[in-house]
Amino acid sequence: MALCAMELGIPTILSCGEHALAAEATALTLGVVTVSVKQGTLPDGLEALDCNSYRKAKLSAIHMSPLKARKLIRDGAFNALQKLKRQPESFFCTKLKPPYVLEMKLRADGDKPARTIRAEHPDSIAGLLNLE
């Protein structure tokens, strides 16, 4: 969604959620304020697992208490807005050059084998995400 916002000239100023999401947001959007409220206990990857095995493997996480998480998110949102007011130029999304390509690797699921879906759009990230 940060890339769609970038395409429209809207900076991404806040990213909240799992620790890995915060790391990805920081890599994609310089200046973004991040708040991590949980951390998965297993690494990403596990490509060899089918859907059901992957779901079971990724059930565990270390969660922050809801009260603390809400406070950190509220504070993060306030800090992001203040930063946007003071230094709007500090938010910078990595520029990508068209054509835009989306590649999804889907795990085996029941009788459906593992597969890769690929789509391309000549000039729009939002257009790419809205292709059928």
Image (cartoon, rainbow, N blue to C red):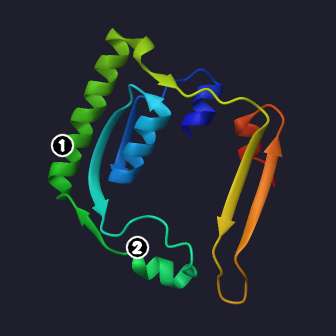
**What SS does tag 1 mark?**
helix
**What SS does tag 2 mark?**
loop
Residue linked to disc 1? 71
On screen, residue 88 versus residue 106, left or right, reads left
The correct choice, above or below, for 14 with respect to 38 in the image is above
Residue linked to disc 2? 58
Estimate the x, y position of residue 16 in percent, counting from the top left.
35, 44
Viewer-proximal residue among 69 and 29: 29
Residue 18 can be seen in this image: no
Residue 34 sits in quarter: top left
Residue at left offset 40%, top offset 16%? 90
- Please name the amino acid that badge 2 sits on: Lys
The residues bearing labels 1 and 2 have C-alpha atoms spaced at a distance of 26 Å
Residue at left offset 37%, top offset 17%? 84
Estimate the x, y position of residue 32 in percent, counting from the top left.
39, 30
Q: Choose mark 1 or mark 2, whichever is in front.
A: 2
On screen, residue 32 versus residue 106, left or right, reads left
On-image quarter of the C terminus:
bottom right
Estimate the x, y position of residue 31 in percent, counting from the top left.
38, 25
Near mark 1 (Cα within 10 A), the count class, few <14, some 14-19 or many ≥20, is few
- Please name the amino acid that badge 1 sits on: Lys
On-image quarter of the N terminus:
top right
